[in-house]
Image (tube, coloured by chain):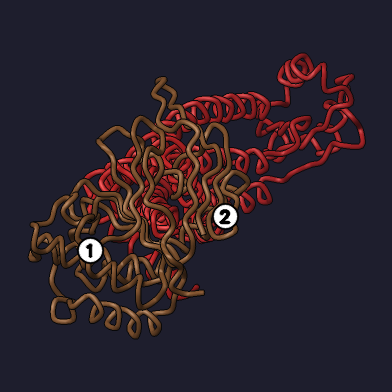
Chain colours: A brown, B red
Protein backbone atom coordinates (compact mmCIF):
# COMPACT_ATOMS: atom_id res chain seq x y z
CA UNK A 1 0.00 0.00 0.00
CA UNK A 2 2.58 2.55 1.14
CA UNK A 3 6.30 2.16 0.84
CA UNK A 4 9.06 4.63 1.77
CA UNK A 5 12.50 3.47 0.63
CA UNK A 6 15.58 5.36 1.83
CA UNK A 7 13.75 8.66 1.71
CA UNK A 8 15.71 11.85 2.36
CA UNK A 9 14.19 15.28 2.47
CA UNK A 10 16.09 18.47 3.10
CA UNK A 11 14.30 21.79 2.73
CA UNK A 12 15.81 24.75 0.91
CA UNK A 13 16.57 26.43 4.24
CA UNK A 14 18.75 23.47 5.23
CA UNK A 15 16.31 21.74 7.57
CA UNK A 16 16.83 18.00 7.37
CA UNK A 17 13.26 16.78 7.71
CA UNK A 18 13.68 13.11 6.81
CA UNK A 19 16.83 11.03 6.96
CA UNK A 20 16.87 7.64 5.34
CA UNK A 21 13.28 6.83 6.20
CA UNK A 22 12.08 3.32 5.47
CA UNK A 23 8.47 2.38 6.12
CA UNK A 24 6.06 -0.14 4.73
CA UNK A 25 2.35 -0.07 5.44
CA UNK A 26 0.14 -2.87 4.20
CA UNK A 27 -3.33 -2.50 2.85
CA UNK A 28 -5.96 -2.32 5.58
CA UNK A 29 -3.58 -1.22 8.34
CA UNK A 30 -4.25 1.53 10.85
CA UNK A 31 -1.04 3.34 11.71
CA UNK A 32 -0.48 6.01 14.35
CA UNK A 33 2.50 8.20 13.56
CA UNK A 34 3.88 9.84 16.68
CA UNK A 35 6.84 12.04 17.49
CA UNK A 36 7.58 15.49 18.85
CA UNK A 37 6.89 18.52 16.72
CA UNK A 38 9.51 19.09 14.07
CA UNK A 39 10.32 15.40 13.96
CA UNK A 40 9.33 15.10 10.32
CA UNK A 41 5.75 13.82 10.61
CA UNK A 42 4.29 16.65 8.54
CA UNK A 43 6.93 16.20 5.87
CA UNK A 44 6.03 12.55 5.67
CA UNK A 45 2.39 13.43 5.10
CA UNK A 46 3.22 16.15 2.60
CA UNK A 47 5.25 13.68 0.59
CA UNK A 48 2.31 11.26 0.64
CA UNK A 49 0.00 14.03 -0.58
CA UNK A 50 2.53 14.84 -3.28
CA UNK A 51 2.82 18.36 -1.93
CA UNK A 52 6.54 17.84 -1.43
CA UNK A 53 8.95 15.56 -3.22
CA UNK A 54 11.88 13.77 -1.54
CA UNK A 55 15.46 14.66 -2.47
CA UNK A 56 16.25 11.00 -2.83
CA UNK A 57 14.64 7.66 -2.21
CA UNK A 58 11.44 6.20 -3.50
CA UNK A 59 7.84 6.50 -2.33
CA UNK A 60 5.20 4.17 -3.74
CA UNK A 61 1.53 4.55 -2.85
CA UNK A 62 -1.09 2.22 -4.28
CA UNK A 63 1.31 1.12 -7.02
CA UNK A 64 1.92 4.76 -7.94
CA UNK A 65 5.57 5.74 -7.95
CA UNK A 66 5.36 9.34 -6.70
CA UNK A 67 8.71 10.43 -8.09
CA UNK A 68 7.59 9.79 -11.66
CA UNK A 69 4.07 11.15 -11.23
CA UNK A 70 3.48 13.83 -13.86
CA UNK A 71 2.23 17.21 -12.70
CA UNK A 72 -1.07 16.85 -14.52
CA UNK A 73 -1.70 13.45 -12.96
CA UNK A 74 -1.35 14.73 -9.40
CA UNK A 75 -5.05 15.66 -9.07
CA UNK A 76 -6.09 12.16 -10.11
CA UNK A 77 -3.68 10.64 -7.63
CA UNK A 78 -5.08 12.83 -4.85
CA UNK A 79 -8.59 11.63 -5.60
CA UNK A 80 -7.53 8.23 -4.36
CA UNK A 81 -6.66 9.74 -0.96
CA UNK A 82 -8.86 11.13 1.76
CA UNK A 83 -7.30 13.93 3.78
CA UNK A 84 -8.34 15.07 7.22
CA UNK A 85 -6.71 18.17 8.70
CA UNK A 86 -6.21 19.49 12.20
CA UNK A 87 -7.96 22.78 11.37
CA UNK A 88 -10.85 20.98 9.59
CA UNK A 89 -10.46 23.11 6.46
CA UNK A 90 -14.14 23.65 5.89
CA UNK A 91 -15.36 26.51 3.72
CA UNK A 92 -17.20 28.86 6.12
CA UNK A 93 -19.75 30.16 3.63
CA UNK A 94 -20.80 26.68 2.53
CA UNK A 95 -23.24 24.45 4.34
CA UNK A 96 -22.21 21.04 5.63
CA UNK A 97 -23.81 19.44 2.60
CA UNK A 98 -21.97 21.72 0.17
CA UNK A 99 -18.66 21.25 1.93
CA UNK A 100 -18.88 17.52 1.42
CA UNK A 101 -20.39 17.85 -2.07
CA UNK A 102 -17.50 20.11 -3.02
CA UNK A 103 -15.03 17.22 -2.97
CA UNK A 104 -17.29 15.25 -5.27
CA UNK A 105 -17.96 18.15 -7.61
CA UNK A 106 -14.26 18.58 -8.18
CA UNK A 107 -14.08 15.09 -9.65
CA UNK A 108 -16.80 15.96 -12.17
CA UNK A 109 -19.59 14.04 -10.45
CA UNK A 110 -23.15 14.76 -11.58
CA UNK A 111 -25.58 16.65 -9.36
CA UNK A 112 -27.69 13.51 -9.23
CA UNK A 113 -24.81 11.43 -7.92
CA UNK A 114 -23.96 14.14 -5.40
CA UNK A 115 -27.53 14.28 -4.08
CA UNK A 116 -27.48 10.55 -3.59
CA UNK A 117 -24.06 10.07 -2.08
CA UNK A 118 -23.64 13.05 0.28
CA UNK A 119 -26.59 12.23 2.59
CA UNK A 120 -25.38 8.65 2.74
CA UNK A 121 -21.91 9.64 3.89
CA UNK A 122 -23.29 12.26 6.29
CA UNK A 123 -25.46 9.61 7.93
CA UNK A 124 -22.33 7.50 8.38
CA UNK A 125 -20.67 10.20 10.47
CA UNK A 126 -23.94 10.94 12.30
CA UNK A 127 -24.57 14.38 10.82
CA UNK A 128 -27.74 13.79 8.80
CA UNK A 129 -29.63 16.45 10.74
CA UNK A 130 -26.87 19.03 10.34
CA UNK A 131 -26.65 18.99 6.55
CA UNK A 132 -27.98 22.54 6.26
CA UNK A 133 -25.88 23.98 9.07
CA UNK A 134 -22.83 26.12 8.49
CA UNK A 135 -19.42 25.24 9.97
CA UNK A 136 -19.57 28.03 12.58
CA UNK A 137 -22.77 26.52 13.97
CA UNK A 138 -21.04 23.24 14.76
CA UNK A 139 -18.79 22.08 17.58
CA UNK A 140 -15.18 21.16 16.86
CA UNK A 141 -16.02 17.47 16.94
CA UNK A 142 -18.89 17.94 14.52
CA UNK A 143 -16.75 20.02 12.18
CA UNK A 144 -14.15 17.29 12.11
CA UNK A 145 -16.82 14.76 11.28
CA UNK A 146 -17.73 16.91 8.29
CA UNK A 147 -14.05 16.81 7.36
CA UNK A 148 -14.14 13.07 7.70
CA UNK A 149 -17.25 12.82 5.53
CA UNK A 150 -15.50 14.89 2.89
CA UNK A 151 -12.47 12.61 3.03
CA UNK A 152 -14.71 9.56 2.62
CA UNK A 153 -16.91 10.82 -0.18
CA UNK A 154 -14.71 9.63 -3.04
CA UNK A 155 -14.16 6.14 -1.56
CA UNK A 156 -10.43 6.52 -0.96
CA UNK A 157 -8.25 3.49 -0.38
CA UNK A 158 -6.10 5.52 1.99
CA UNK A 159 -7.01 8.16 4.56
CA UNK A 160 -4.32 10.52 5.78
CA UNK A 161 -5.26 12.30 8.99
CA UNK A 162 -3.02 15.11 10.20
CA UNK A 163 -3.68 15.50 13.94
CA UNK A 164 -7.43 15.21 13.42
CA UNK A 165 -8.12 15.55 17.14
CA UNK A 166 -5.85 18.55 17.72
CA UNK A 167 -8.75 21.03 17.88
CA UNK A 168 -11.36 18.72 19.37
CA UNK A 169 -12.19 18.18 23.04
CA UNK A 170 -11.11 14.83 24.54
CA UNK A 171 -14.48 13.07 24.52
CA UNK A 172 -15.06 14.00 20.91
CA UNK A 173 -11.49 13.03 20.07
CA UNK A 174 -12.23 9.50 21.11
CA UNK A 175 -15.31 9.53 18.90
CA UNK A 176 -13.36 10.72 15.85
CA UNK A 177 -10.67 8.10 16.19
CA UNK A 178 -13.31 5.50 16.85
CA UNK A 179 -14.96 6.47 13.59
CA UNK A 180 -11.68 6.13 11.74
CA UNK A 181 -11.25 2.77 13.43
CA UNK A 182 -14.69 1.67 12.26
CA UNK A 183 -14.03 2.82 8.72
CA UNK A 184 -10.82 0.83 8.77
CA UNK A 185 -12.50 -2.31 10.12
CA UNK A 186 -15.60 -2.13 7.96
CA UNK A 187 -14.22 -0.92 4.64
CA UNK A 188 -10.63 -2.04 4.83
CA UNK A 189 -9.49 1.54 4.25
CA UNK A 190 -5.84 2.03 5.13
CA UNK A 191 -5.43 4.83 7.68
CA UNK A 192 -2.41 6.89 8.58
CA UNK A 193 -2.96 9.20 11.52
CA UNK A 194 -0.45 11.66 12.91
CA UNK A 195 -1.12 12.47 16.54
CA UNK A 196 0.31 13.82 19.78
CA UNK A 197 -2.27 12.23 22.01
CA UNK A 198 -0.75 9.22 23.64
CA UNK A 199 -3.92 8.38 25.52
CA UNK A 200 -5.71 7.74 22.23
CA UNK A 201 -2.84 5.75 20.83
CA UNK A 202 -2.78 3.54 23.91
CA UNK A 203 -6.52 3.08 23.89
CA UNK A 204 -6.85 1.87 20.31
CA UNK A 205 -3.84 -0.41 20.28
CA UNK A 206 -3.01 -0.21 16.59
CA UNK A 207 0.34 -0.03 14.85
CA UNK A 208 2.54 2.79 16.17
CA UNK A 209 5.40 4.35 14.24
CA UNK A 210 7.60 6.90 15.99
CA UNK A 211 9.69 9.45 14.17
CA UNK A 212 12.44 11.55 15.78
CA UNK A 213 14.73 13.97 13.95
CA UNK A 214 13.60 12.65 10.62
CA UNK A 215 14.38 9.07 11.44
CA UNK A 216 12.15 6.15 12.25
CA UNK A 217 13.02 5.26 15.84
CA UNK A 218 10.28 2.83 16.80
CA UNK A 219 7.74 0.68 15.00
CA UNK A 220 5.37 -1.74 16.67
CA UNK A 221 5.46 -3.73 13.46
CA UNK A 222 2.91 -4.49 10.76
CA UNK A 223 -0.51 -5.47 11.98
CA UNK A 224 -1.93 -8.85 11.21
CA UNK A 225 -3.64 -8.38 7.92
CA UNK A 226 -7.37 -8.56 8.52
CA UNK A 227 -8.27 -8.76 4.91
CA UNK A 228 -6.20 -11.31 3.12
CA UNK B 1 -18.90 18.01 -17.28
CA UNK B 2 -21.88 20.24 -18.04
CA UNK B 3 -22.88 20.23 -14.37
CA UNK B 4 -19.46 21.48 -13.56
CA UNK B 5 -19.56 24.12 -16.24
CA UNK B 6 -22.70 25.64 -14.82
CA UNK B 7 -21.28 25.45 -11.33
CA UNK B 8 -17.99 27.03 -12.33
CA UNK B 9 -19.65 29.88 -14.22
CA UNK B 10 -21.83 30.60 -11.21
CA UNK B 11 -18.75 30.64 -9.01
CA UNK B 12 -17.06 33.09 -11.36
CA UNK B 13 -20.01 35.46 -11.28
CA UNK B 14 -20.10 35.23 -7.53
CA UNK B 15 -16.40 36.11 -7.36
CA UNK B 16 -16.91 39.15 -9.56
CA UNK B 17 -19.76 40.37 -7.36
CA UNK B 18 -18.10 39.62 -4.03
CA UNK B 19 -15.12 41.63 -5.22
CA UNK B 20 -17.18 44.35 -6.88
CA UNK B 21 -15.11 47.40 -6.05
CA UNK B 22 -12.11 46.01 -7.88
CA UNK B 23 -14.35 44.58 -10.57
CA UNK B 24 -15.75 48.04 -11.25
CA UNK B 25 -12.29 49.57 -11.22
CA UNK B 26 -11.16 47.03 -13.80
CA UNK B 27 -14.21 47.64 -15.93
CA UNK B 28 -13.67 51.40 -15.71
CA UNK B 29 -10.08 51.33 -16.90
CA UNK B 30 -10.84 48.84 -19.60
CA UNK B 31 -13.72 51.04 -20.80
CA UNK B 32 -11.39 54.07 -21.04
CA UNK B 33 -8.99 51.99 -23.05
CA UNK B 34 -11.61 50.61 -25.40
CA UNK B 35 -13.36 53.95 -25.93
CA UNK B 36 -10.10 55.62 -26.91
CA UNK B 37 -9.18 52.74 -29.14
CA UNK B 38 -12.61 52.77 -30.78
CA UNK B 39 -12.55 56.54 -31.31
CA UNK B 40 -9.11 56.44 -32.87
CA UNK B 41 -10.17 53.70 -35.24
CA UNK B 42 -13.34 55.57 -36.21
CA UNK B 43 -11.49 58.83 -36.85
CA UNK B 44 -8.99 56.99 -38.99
CA UNK B 45 -11.64 55.12 -40.94
CA UNK B 46 -13.44 58.36 -41.66
CA UNK B 47 -10.33 60.18 -42.82
CA UNK B 48 -9.59 57.37 -45.21
CA UNK B 49 -13.15 57.61 -46.42
CA UNK B 50 -12.88 61.36 -47.02
CA UNK B 51 -9.64 60.89 -48.88
CA UNK B 52 -11.30 58.43 -51.19
CA UNK B 53 -13.91 61.03 -51.96
CA UNK B 54 -11.28 63.34 -53.34
CA UNK B 55 -10.22 62.79 -56.85
CA UNK B 56 -6.99 61.21 -57.75
CA UNK B 57 -4.21 63.20 -56.17
CA UNK B 58 -2.82 63.92 -59.62
CA UNK B 59 -5.95 65.68 -60.80
CA UNK B 60 -7.09 69.21 -60.02
CA UNK B 61 -10.28 71.15 -60.63
CA UNK B 62 -9.64 74.33 -62.58
CA UNK B 63 -12.45 76.82 -62.06
CA UNK B 64 -12.96 79.35 -64.80
CA UNK B 65 -13.78 83.04 -64.91
CA UNK B 66 -17.22 84.04 -66.05
CA UNK B 67 -15.71 84.66 -69.46
CA UNK B 68 -16.69 81.29 -70.81
CA UNK B 69 -20.44 81.37 -70.76
CA UNK B 70 -20.70 85.05 -69.90
CA UNK B 71 -22.45 87.16 -72.47
CA UNK B 72 -19.91 89.75 -73.70
CA UNK B 73 -16.46 88.43 -74.61
CA UNK B 74 -17.64 84.95 -74.94
CA UNK B 75 -14.99 82.32 -75.38
CA UNK B 76 -15.91 78.87 -76.45
CA UNK B 77 -15.11 75.85 -74.34
CA UNK B 78 -12.66 74.77 -77.01
CA UNK B 79 -10.79 78.10 -76.76
CA UNK B 80 -10.34 77.64 -73.03
CA UNK B 81 -9.25 74.06 -73.46
CA UNK B 82 -6.57 75.23 -75.88
CA UNK B 83 -5.31 77.70 -73.32
CA UNK B 84 -5.14 75.01 -70.67
CA UNK B 85 -3.26 72.73 -73.00
CA UNK B 86 -0.59 75.35 -73.42
CA UNK B 87 0.61 74.40 -69.98
CA UNK B 88 3.25 71.90 -70.79
CA UNK B 89 2.63 69.31 -68.08
CA UNK B 90 -1.11 68.95 -68.73
CA UNK B 91 -2.05 65.55 -70.08
CA UNK B 92 -4.23 66.16 -73.16
CA UNK B 93 -6.13 62.94 -72.58
CA UNK B 94 -7.14 63.93 -69.09
CA UNK B 95 -8.78 67.26 -69.64
CA UNK B 96 -12.50 67.20 -69.13
CA UNK B 97 -15.00 70.05 -69.13
CA UNK B 98 -17.35 70.18 -66.14
CA UNK B 99 -20.23 72.59 -66.82
CA UNK B 100 -21.49 74.41 -63.75
CA UNK B 101 -24.81 72.54 -63.75
CA UNK B 102 -23.04 69.21 -63.41
CA UNK B 103 -20.76 70.53 -60.71
CA UNK B 104 -23.77 71.81 -58.81
CA UNK B 105 -25.71 68.58 -58.94
CA UNK B 106 -22.73 66.49 -57.87
CA UNK B 107 -22.20 68.86 -54.97
CA UNK B 108 -25.86 68.58 -54.02
CA UNK B 109 -25.59 64.81 -54.01
CA UNK B 110 -23.06 64.95 -51.26
CA UNK B 111 -25.31 66.90 -49.02
CA UNK B 112 -28.08 65.85 -46.79
CA UNK B 113 -31.58 65.40 -48.19
CA UNK B 114 -32.63 68.64 -46.53
CA UNK B 115 -30.37 70.64 -48.79
CA UNK B 116 -32.15 69.33 -51.86
CA UNK B 117 -34.40 72.36 -51.46
CA UNK B 118 -31.59 74.31 -53.06
CA UNK B 119 -32.31 72.50 -56.28
CA UNK B 120 -35.77 73.97 -56.50
CA UNK B 121 -34.16 77.39 -56.75
CA UNK B 122 -32.64 76.21 -59.99
CA UNK B 123 -29.86 78.06 -61.73
CA UNK B 124 -30.21 81.21 -59.67
CA UNK B 125 -28.75 79.33 -56.72
CA UNK B 126 -25.91 77.93 -58.70
CA UNK B 127 -22.98 80.09 -57.84
CA UNK B 128 -20.46 77.60 -59.14
CA UNK B 129 -18.34 78.59 -62.09
CA UNK B 130 -17.69 76.27 -65.02
CA UNK B 131 -14.65 74.11 -64.54
CA UNK B 132 -12.17 71.77 -66.13
CA UNK B 133 -10.94 68.58 -64.58
CA UNK B 134 -7.27 68.49 -65.47
CA UNK B 135 -4.82 65.61 -65.15
CA UNK B 136 -1.02 65.91 -65.21
CA UNK B 137 1.60 63.92 -67.03
CA UNK B 138 4.28 64.20 -64.41
CA UNK B 139 3.04 64.26 -60.80
CA UNK B 140 6.42 65.39 -59.45
CA UNK B 141 5.97 68.79 -61.09
CA UNK B 142 2.58 69.21 -59.44
CA UNK B 143 3.22 72.51 -57.66
CA UNK B 144 4.63 74.41 -60.61
CA UNK B 145 1.94 73.13 -62.92
CA UNK B 146 -0.76 74.30 -60.54
CA UNK B 147 0.95 77.69 -60.41
CA UNK B 148 1.10 77.86 -64.20
CA UNK B 149 -2.60 77.05 -64.45
CA UNK B 150 -3.44 79.73 -61.91
CA UNK B 151 -1.59 82.27 -64.04
CA UNK B 152 -3.82 81.68 -67.05
CA UNK B 153 -6.19 84.65 -67.55
CA UNK B 154 -9.28 82.44 -67.91
CA UNK B 155 -8.67 80.67 -64.65
CA UNK B 156 -10.41 81.88 -61.53
CA UNK B 157 -8.85 79.43 -59.14
CA UNK B 158 -7.50 75.92 -58.89
CA UNK B 159 -8.77 73.63 -56.21
CA UNK B 160 -5.69 72.05 -54.83
CA UNK B 161 -6.64 68.69 -53.36
CA UNK B 162 -3.12 67.74 -52.54
CA UNK B 163 -2.99 70.22 -49.75
CA UNK B 164 -6.15 68.81 -48.21
CA UNK B 165 -5.02 65.28 -48.75
CA UNK B 166 -1.70 65.94 -47.09
CA UNK B 167 -3.31 67.65 -44.15
CA UNK B 168 -5.72 64.77 -43.71
CA UNK B 169 -2.97 62.24 -44.02
CA UNK B 170 -1.03 64.14 -41.36
CA UNK B 171 -4.03 64.06 -39.03
CA UNK B 172 -4.53 60.40 -39.75
CA UNK B 173 -0.94 59.62 -38.88
CA UNK B 174 -1.04 61.66 -35.69
CA UNK B 175 -4.25 59.98 -34.61
CA UNK B 176 -2.78 56.56 -35.32
CA UNK B 177 0.51 57.18 -33.53
CA UNK B 178 -0.90 58.97 -30.48
CA UNK B 179 -3.81 56.55 -30.36
CA UNK B 180 -1.56 53.52 -30.48
CA UNK B 181 0.57 54.82 -27.63
CA UNK B 182 -2.33 55.77 -25.41
CA UNK B 183 -4.14 52.55 -26.10
CA UNK B 184 -1.01 50.50 -25.53
CA UNK B 185 -0.39 52.22 -22.24
CA UNK B 186 -3.97 51.84 -21.09
CA UNK B 187 -4.01 48.22 -22.15
CA UNK B 188 -1.05 47.54 -19.91
CA UNK B 189 -2.76 49.41 -17.07
CA UNK B 190 -6.02 47.55 -17.52
CA UNK B 191 -4.30 44.19 -17.70
CA UNK B 192 -2.45 45.10 -14.52
CA UNK B 193 -5.68 46.01 -12.76
CA UNK B 194 -7.55 42.93 -13.97
CA UNK B 195 -4.64 40.78 -12.87
CA UNK B 196 -4.72 42.37 -9.44
CA UNK B 197 -8.48 42.10 -9.13
CA UNK B 198 -8.30 38.42 -9.77
CA UNK B 199 -5.27 37.96 -7.57
CA UNK B 200 -7.27 39.56 -4.78
CA UNK B 201 -10.12 37.11 -5.31
CA UNK B 202 -7.61 34.34 -5.31
CA UNK B 203 -6.15 35.31 -1.96
CA UNK B 204 -9.64 35.68 -0.54
CA UNK B 205 -10.35 32.14 -1.72
CA UNK B 206 -7.00 30.75 -0.70
CA UNK B 207 -8.53 28.25 1.67
CA UNK B 208 -10.98 27.11 -0.95
CA UNK B 209 -8.26 26.64 -3.53
CA UNK B 210 -6.09 24.64 -1.16
CA UNK B 211 -9.05 22.42 -0.32
CA UNK B 212 -9.80 22.02 -4.01
CA UNK B 213 -6.27 20.87 -4.55
CA UNK B 214 -6.35 18.47 -1.64
CA UNK B 215 -9.45 16.75 -2.97
CA UNK B 216 -7.91 16.44 -6.42
CA UNK B 217 -9.17 19.38 -8.47
CA UNK B 218 -7.34 19.82 -11.75
CA UNK B 219 -5.69 23.14 -12.49
CA UNK B 220 -8.41 23.85 -15.05
CA UNK B 221 -11.15 23.31 -12.53
CA UNK B 222 -9.45 25.80 -10.22
CA UNK B 223 -8.86 28.24 -13.04
CA UNK B 224 -12.36 28.29 -14.48
CA UNK B 225 -14.15 30.58 -11.98
CA UNK B 226 -11.33 33.11 -12.25
CA UNK B 227 -11.41 32.89 -16.00
CA UNK B 228 -15.14 33.53 -15.91
CA UNK B 229 -14.54 36.52 -13.65
CA UNK B 230 -12.03 37.96 -16.11
CA UNK B 231 -14.28 37.34 -19.09
CA UNK B 232 -17.24 38.93 -17.33
CA UNK B 233 -15.15 42.04 -16.65
CA UNK B 234 -14.09 42.14 -20.29
CA UNK B 235 -17.59 41.54 -21.59
CA UNK B 236 -19.19 44.27 -19.50
CA UNK B 237 -16.40 46.70 -20.38
CA UNK B 238 -16.86 45.86 -24.07
CA UNK B 239 -20.59 46.51 -23.95
CA UNK B 240 -20.27 49.79 -22.05
CA UNK B 241 -17.56 51.02 -24.43
CA UNK B 242 -19.67 50.10 -27.40
CA UNK B 243 -22.60 52.07 -26.04
CA UNK B 244 -20.43 55.09 -25.23
CA UNK B 245 -18.67 55.15 -28.58
CA UNK B 246 -21.96 54.71 -30.43
CA UNK B 247 -23.38 57.68 -28.60
CA UNK B 248 -20.30 59.86 -29.12
CA UNK B 249 -20.16 58.91 -32.78
CA UNK B 250 -23.75 59.78 -33.57
CA UNK B 251 -23.46 63.05 -31.64
CA UNK B 252 -20.23 63.94 -33.42
CA UNK B 253 -21.60 62.81 -36.77
CA UNK B 254 -24.50 65.24 -36.71
CA UNK B 255 -22.32 68.22 -35.80
CA UNK B 256 -19.66 67.29 -38.34
CA UNK B 257 -22.21 66.95 -41.13
CA UNK B 258 -23.21 70.54 -40.35
CA UNK B 259 -19.79 71.89 -41.20
CA UNK B 260 -18.30 69.38 -43.60
CA UNK B 261 -19.77 68.62 -46.97
CA UNK B 262 -18.41 65.11 -47.05
CA UNK B 263 -20.12 64.09 -43.80
CA UNK B 264 -19.13 60.94 -41.96
CA UNK B 265 -19.59 57.26 -42.61
CA UNK B 266 -23.03 56.12 -41.54
CA UNK B 267 -22.82 54.31 -38.24
CA UNK B 268 -24.92 51.39 -39.41
CA UNK B 269 -22.18 50.17 -41.70
CA UNK B 270 -19.70 50.05 -38.80
CA UNK B 271 -22.04 48.78 -36.11
CA UNK B 272 -21.45 45.06 -36.34
CA UNK B 273 -17.69 45.18 -36.79
CA UNK B 274 -17.35 47.62 -33.96
CA UNK B 275 -19.46 45.56 -31.58
CA UNK B 276 -17.46 42.44 -32.37
CA UNK B 277 -14.16 44.29 -31.97
CA UNK B 278 -15.19 45.68 -28.58
CA UNK B 279 -16.46 42.40 -27.24
CA UNK B 280 -13.47 40.58 -28.67
CA UNK B 281 -10.85 42.86 -27.18
CA UNK B 282 -12.71 43.03 -23.86
CA UNK B 283 -12.89 39.27 -23.56
CA UNK B 284 -9.32 38.85 -24.74
CA UNK B 285 -7.92 41.21 -22.12
CA UNK B 286 -10.06 39.63 -19.41
CA UNK B 287 -8.85 36.18 -20.35
CA UNK B 288 -5.21 37.15 -20.52
CA UNK B 289 -5.43 39.04 -17.23
CA UNK B 290 -6.95 36.13 -15.36
CA UNK B 291 -4.73 33.45 -16.87
CA UNK B 292 -1.61 35.40 -16.01
CA UNK B 293 -2.61 35.82 -12.37
CA UNK B 294 -3.71 32.21 -11.87
CA UNK B 295 -0.59 30.90 -13.50
CA UNK B 296 1.53 32.82 -11.05
CA UNK B 297 -0.62 31.74 -8.12
CA UNK B 298 -0.69 28.05 -8.96
CA UNK B 299 3.06 28.09 -9.40
CA UNK B 300 4.15 29.99 -6.33
CA UNK B 301 1.52 30.02 -3.65
CA UNK B 302 -1.02 27.33 -4.21
CA UNK B 303 -0.16 24.67 -1.69
CA UNK B 304 -2.39 22.31 0.21
CA UNK B 305 -1.62 24.19 3.39
CA UNK B 306 -2.37 27.88 3.15
CA UNK B 307 -0.05 28.98 5.95
Residue under circle 2? A73
Q: x%, y% of residue B186?
A: 42, 32
Of the pair B32 and B220, the residue shown nearer to us = B220
**Could you tell me which residue is drawn at 23 percent across and 59 percent down?**
A90
- Looking at the image, can residue A93 be seen? yes
Residue B89, above or below B282:
above
Of the pair B207 and B16, the residue shown nearer to us = B207
Of the pair B238 and A96, the residue shown nearer to us = A96
Describe the element under mark 1 as helix, strand or loop.
helix
**Could you tell me which residue is drawn at 34 percent across and 85 percent down?**
A116
Left or right: B292 with respect to B196?
right
At label 1, counting other C-alpha atoms closer than 10 Å, the crowd grade (few under 14, some 14-19, many 20 or more) is: some
Dot label at residue A177: 1
Q: CA distance from mark 1 to mark 2?
A: 31 Å
Q: x%, y% of residue B150?
A: 71, 20
Q: Which image quadrant: the C terminus of chain B?
A: top left
Left or right: B264 with respect to A212?
right
**Sequence order check: which comes first, mark 1 or mark 2?**
2
Q: Residue furthest right?
A: B93
Q: Quadrant of residue A193?
A: bottom left
Amino acid sequence: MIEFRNVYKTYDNGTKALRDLNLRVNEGEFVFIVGSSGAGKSTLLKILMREETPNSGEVIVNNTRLSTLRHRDIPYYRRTLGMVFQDFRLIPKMSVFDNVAFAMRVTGASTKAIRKKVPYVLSHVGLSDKAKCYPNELSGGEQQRVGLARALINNPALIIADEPTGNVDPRMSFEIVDMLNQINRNNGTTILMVTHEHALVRKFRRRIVEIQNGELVADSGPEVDYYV
Amino acid sequence: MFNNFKYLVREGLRNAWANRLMTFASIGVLVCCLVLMGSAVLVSVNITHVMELFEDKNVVMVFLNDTVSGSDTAMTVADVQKQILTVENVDPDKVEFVPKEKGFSSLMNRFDEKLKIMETLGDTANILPDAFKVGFKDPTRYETTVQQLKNLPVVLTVRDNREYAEKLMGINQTVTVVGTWIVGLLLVVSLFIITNTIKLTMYVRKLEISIMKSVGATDWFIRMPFLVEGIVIGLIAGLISFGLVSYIYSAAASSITDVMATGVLPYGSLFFNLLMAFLGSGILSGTIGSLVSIRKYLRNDGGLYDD
